[in-house]
Image (cartoon, rainbow, N blue to C red):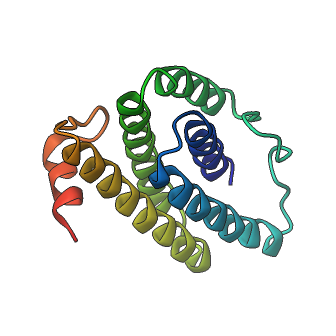
Amino acid sequence: WEEEKAARDLYTSLYDKNNLSIFMNLLRSEQSHMDQAKAIIDKYGLTIPAKDEPGVFQNVTLQEIHNKLLAEGLQSDQDALLVAATFEEISIMDLEREISATETEDIKVVYQGLLAGSRKHLRSYVSELQGRGIQYAPKYLDKARFEEIVKVG
């Protein structure tokens, strides 16, 4: 839930700064992802790790990633798109790790849906950058894995 919140909060701040419609579209998607994660949290009687306060996270690593990417993304429209793609790479890696770590089928199904969303978002950001004449180079995914994700339609 918190990672989806981080994406939503990041994209909200970037949209507020540069008004690029891609951020408005994808932050709505991230809110939907948060709702899906919350349904699982509620089902298993867990608690959400943080209040829904913009830009505030209980997970220290996630807080650092959010702060770093936000600072970079606020520099320009191009930087905003680059950090958004970077965040989706991180999300893909985290979700793949979580999918392989769980045996619980309904949790796995939700994670797989979130993973499909992150892949789609990464393709969207890469496409937006390419439309601006910028070739995105992956920062976390290996090149072959990245190419596999962005080639899928």
Choose between 75 and 114: the one closer to the eye. Answer: 75
Q: Is residue 109 left or right of residue 43?
A: left
Q: Residue at x 74, y 35 (%)?
A: 57
For this orientation, the residue located farthest to the front is: 19
Query: Total marks drawn?
Result: 0
Q: Quadrant of the N terminus?
A: bottom right
Q: Which residue is located at x 75 percent, y 65 percent?
A: 38
In the picture, the quarter occupied by the C terminus is bottom left
Image-based side of 46 in relation to 64, left or right: right
Say which of 68 and 145 sits in front: 68
Residue drawn at x 82%, y 47% as measured from the top left: 52
Q: Quadrant of residue 70?
A: top right
User: Residue 136 falls in which quadrant of the image?
Assistant: top left
Residue 144: image location, x then y, percent: 13, 48
Compared with residue 114, is residue 89 higher up or lower down, i.e. above or below? above
In the image, taking residue 57 as reference, residue 73 lies left or right, namely left
**Position in image of residue 22 (x %, y %):** 45, 54
**Where does the image place residue 30, in percent across and percent down from the top left?**
59, 59
Q: Is residue 105 above or below residue 95?
A: below
Residue sitting at 53 percent across and 72 percent down? 108
